[in-house]
Image: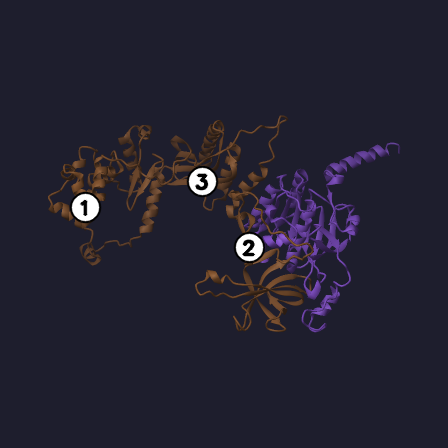
């Protein structure tokens, strides 16, 4: 029994060797919403692979927005490091091209963006493999199209290992895909949420709902409704009241199918 | 068979005559191809359309054992393609042009005066005029004062004569400008494998790197030409965002280029000459490597972008730049990342405003079916990609006028933009094309973008 601490330490070392280096204390980035950060133990690690799934195909724009916001958080606010956004051609056709003024409206400096459009999935994965090894890349967003069968456990493990080595934060955007085995550090499901209406029933600040599906640290069942504060480059807990039940524009409440959906949302 | 014969006559004389339409563009392409192959003799190759090539072989002939040997080599090579070549060697391009057409195989000097006056390249009437005046040979004209010829047939004719007989010399304008650096290697035996040819290119790149380092120069474009024995030339071109001279970096890009080719390089009967050219030098100072070893990290992003651009195409790796326009789809444009660094000048934002422009834009906008409470009001529901969206929040209209001053009829439809949110929290950017009642009876609706 006297030997147990040393045995434990040896086991820890072995497990540690298998798991790879743990993120250092300073290498976490906070999301900005205090409750969520506390539950995550300070935030998410930089230099890791994080996977984002869209709840439905139409949540594509919310997914891209969430990824960009997370990348901004990982880069510390406005940032200046280049952000590489690898997109597969099908995804560009489905979601549209990236629009500079709109990205700037989220607080992102479009001059940082380098958009790469890959014609197919193998080209996308190959470009991702090259990009993730370049330490000068601030953040890497990979947007495959639909199921992306080539992106299996091996491929994601390769990305994850390379990301740990180079310190590039990688965000994988899966719009129309089912979560499968992967080596991602964390996995989230993103959906768009009703925004807090501004005066005269105008759509408000970007609002997303995120739900933690998997976390290397063993966390589970986290979910949050977040609003993006562009001026602070930060997420905030969305105000619960007021946002939930705005009236349909120009029509009395309850007419048509919108209001009941609204209640369940 | 003579030129000018009608088809019916020709068919009457030769019943099994094969007939093909004249395709001047295909001829021009073929001439270009032959000119590519002639690059092996000299970098100074000019087209002499529609059917000629001019090669300036000054200083190149000794490489093939003299002018006549070079000419024989060229004629044999083109003969293998099934071409009959009329060639001439002369001191000036015009003399060579005239000799090849009127005394093929002739030697300059002795025969120039004996050329017929047609060699001046004048039009039919002037030739008839010359002949009526008793001039049959260039030698007859040469004896007369030049201004007489100029007065009767124009400055061009006397100029041409002086250039043919060698009183005046002009330089040919080559098809491509002379590169800053050109290195080549000839093989005694043709190399049958592309890898082998590329290895030779690798050695040339190494030599070029040394030369460029001495001159404190680098290149942003590199071209490798692989000359096949049968005259076909395959060129591989690469481009970098920053000047480079590191042989490893350059060769890596050539490998990428080779792998990305739609139709692979076919060695055919083998390559017998490879050439590397650097069209232009740019200043590149020698780098100080870190004392403790290891490579410099600064250029890594540039190298990554070079690699991706070479592999995927330069337009697939791009940056965004703002443009001063109120038309949404023209307010930003994408440019190849290899052409320059980040572009600033994005408009500043007002604090506390929600995003007014979408993160994703559809180009072109996609048509949607819309139901609106009032014809010129915001939409209350719309159908896009077969799915019905109930609008819960809407802001608008933001009216964006057409560029009527760019159009001849000063017209163009205004667009009324609405930011809307549907029951599931998705935010869209819709517009109505045309003002209701004034510009359009039934304005069409489009979706132009998606908000996060």
Judging by the rendered image, the residue that carries numbered circle 3 is B236
For the residues carrying marks 2 and 3, which lies nearer the camera in this image? 2
Name above or below for residue B316 compared with residue B401.
above
Mark 2 Cα shell of 10 Å, populated few (<14), some (14-19), many (≥20)? some
Q: Are marks 3 and 1 in contact (CB under 8 Å)?
A: no
Colour of the chain lettered B: brown
Horizontal relation, residue B175 to residue B250: left or right: left
Of helix, strand and loop, which one carries label 2?
A: loop
Q: Position of residue B292 (x, y in %)?
A: 64, 26
The residue pinned by badge 1 equals: B153
Of residues A150 and A104, the one drawn nearer to the viewer in this rendering: A104
Say which colour chain A has. Answer: purple
Q: Residues within 10 Å of mark 3 (few under 14, many from 20)?
A: some
Chain letter, disc 1 residue: B
Q: CA distance from mark 2 to mark 3?
A: 36 Å
User: Do the dots labelled 3 and 1 sit on one chain?
Assistant: yes
Question: B80 or B281: nearer the eye?
Answer: B281
What residue does disc 2 label?
A: B331
**In percent of the image, x 14 and y 48: which residue is there?**
B129
Report the label total.
3
Q: Quadrant of residue A28?
A: top right
């Amino acid at each position: 029994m006297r030997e147990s601490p040393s045995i434990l330490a040896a086991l820890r070392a072995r497990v540690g060797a298998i798991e790879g280096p743990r993120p250092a204390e300073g290498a976490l980035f906070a999301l900005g919403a205090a409750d969520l950060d506390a539950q995550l133990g300070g935030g998410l690690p930089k230099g890791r692979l994080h996977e984002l799934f869209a709840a439905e195909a139409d949540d594509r724009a919310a997914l891209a927005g969430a990824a960009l916001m997370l990348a901004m958080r990982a880069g510390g606010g406005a940032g200046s490091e280049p952000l590489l956004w690898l997109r597969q051609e099908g995804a560009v056709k489905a979601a549209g091209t990236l629009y500079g003024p709109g990205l700037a409206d989220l607080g992102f400096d479009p001059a940082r963006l380098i958009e790469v459009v890959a014609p197919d999935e193998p080209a996308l994965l190959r470009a991702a493999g090259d990009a993730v090894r370049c330490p000068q890349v601030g953040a890497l967003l990979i947007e495959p199209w639909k199921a992306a069968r080539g992106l299996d456990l091996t491929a994601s493990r390769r990305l994850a290992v390379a990301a740990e080595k180079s310190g590039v934060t990688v965000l994988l955007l899966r719009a129309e895909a089912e979560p499968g085995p992967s080596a991602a550090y964390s996995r989230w499901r993103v959906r768009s949420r009703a925004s807090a209406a501004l005066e005269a029933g105008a759509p408000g600040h970007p609002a997303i709902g995120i739900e933690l599906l998997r976390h290397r640290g063993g966390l589970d069942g986290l979910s949050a409704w977040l609003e993006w504060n562009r001026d602070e480059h930060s997420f905030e807990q969305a105000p619960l009241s007021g946002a939930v039940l705005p009236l349909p524009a120009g029509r009395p409440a309850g007419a048509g199918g919108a209001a009941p959906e609204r209640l369940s949302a | 068979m003579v030129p000018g014969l009608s088809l019916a006559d020709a068919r009457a004389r030769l019943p099994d005559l094969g007939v093909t339409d004249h395709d001047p563009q295909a001829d021009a392409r073929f001439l270009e191809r032959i000119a590519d192959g002639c690059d092996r003799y000299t970098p100074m190759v000019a087209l002499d359309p529609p059917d000629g090539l001019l090669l300036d072989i000054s200083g190149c002939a000794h490489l093939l054992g003299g002018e006549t040997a070079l000419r024989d080599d060229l004629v044999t090579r083109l003969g293998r393609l099934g071409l009959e070549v009329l060639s001439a060697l002369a001191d000036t391009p015009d003399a060579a042009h005239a000799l090849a057409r009127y005394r093929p195989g002739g030697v300059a000097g002795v025969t120039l005066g004996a050329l017929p006056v047609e060699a001046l390249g004048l039009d039919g009437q002037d030739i008839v005029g010359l002949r009526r005046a008793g001039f049959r040979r260039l030698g007859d004209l040469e004896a007369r004062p030049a201004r007489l010829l100029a007065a009767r047939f124009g400055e061009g004719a006397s100029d041409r004569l002086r250039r043919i007989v060698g009183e005046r010399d002009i330089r040919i304008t080559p098809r491509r400008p002379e590169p800053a650096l050109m290195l080549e290697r000839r093989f005694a035996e043709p190399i049958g494998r592309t890898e082998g040819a590329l290895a030779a290119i690798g050695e040339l790149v190494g030599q070029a790197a040394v030369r460029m380092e001495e001159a404190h120069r680098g290149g942003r474009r590199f071209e490798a030409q692989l000359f096949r024995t049968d005259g076909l030339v395959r060129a591989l071109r690469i481009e970098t965002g920053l000047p480079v001279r590191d042989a490893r970096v350059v060769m890596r890009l050539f490998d990428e280029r080779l792998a990305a080719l739609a139709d692979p390089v076919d060695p055919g009967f083998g390559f017998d000459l490879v050439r590397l050219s650097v069209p232009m030098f740019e200043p590149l100072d020698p780098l100080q490597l870190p004392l403790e070893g290891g490579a410099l990290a600064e250029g890594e992003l540039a190298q990554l972008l070079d690699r991706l651009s070479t592999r995927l195409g330069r337009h697939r790796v791009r940056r965004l730049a703002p443009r001063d326009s109120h038309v949404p789809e023209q307010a930003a444009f994408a440019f190849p990342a290899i052409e320059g660094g980040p572009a600033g000048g994005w408009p500043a934002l007002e604090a506390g405003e929600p995003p007014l422009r979408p993160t994703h834009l559809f180009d072109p906008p996609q048509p949607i079916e819309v139901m609106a409470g009032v014809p010129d009001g915001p939409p209350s529901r719309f159908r896009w990609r077969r799915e019905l969206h109930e609008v819960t929040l809407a802001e608008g209209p933001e009216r964006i006028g057409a560029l009527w001053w760019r159009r001849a009829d000063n017209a163009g439809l205004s667009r009324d933009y609405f930011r809307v949110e549907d029951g599931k929290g998705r935010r869209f950017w819709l517009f109505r094309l045309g003002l209701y009642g004034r510009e359009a009876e039934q304005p069409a609706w489009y979706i132009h973008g998606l908000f996060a």
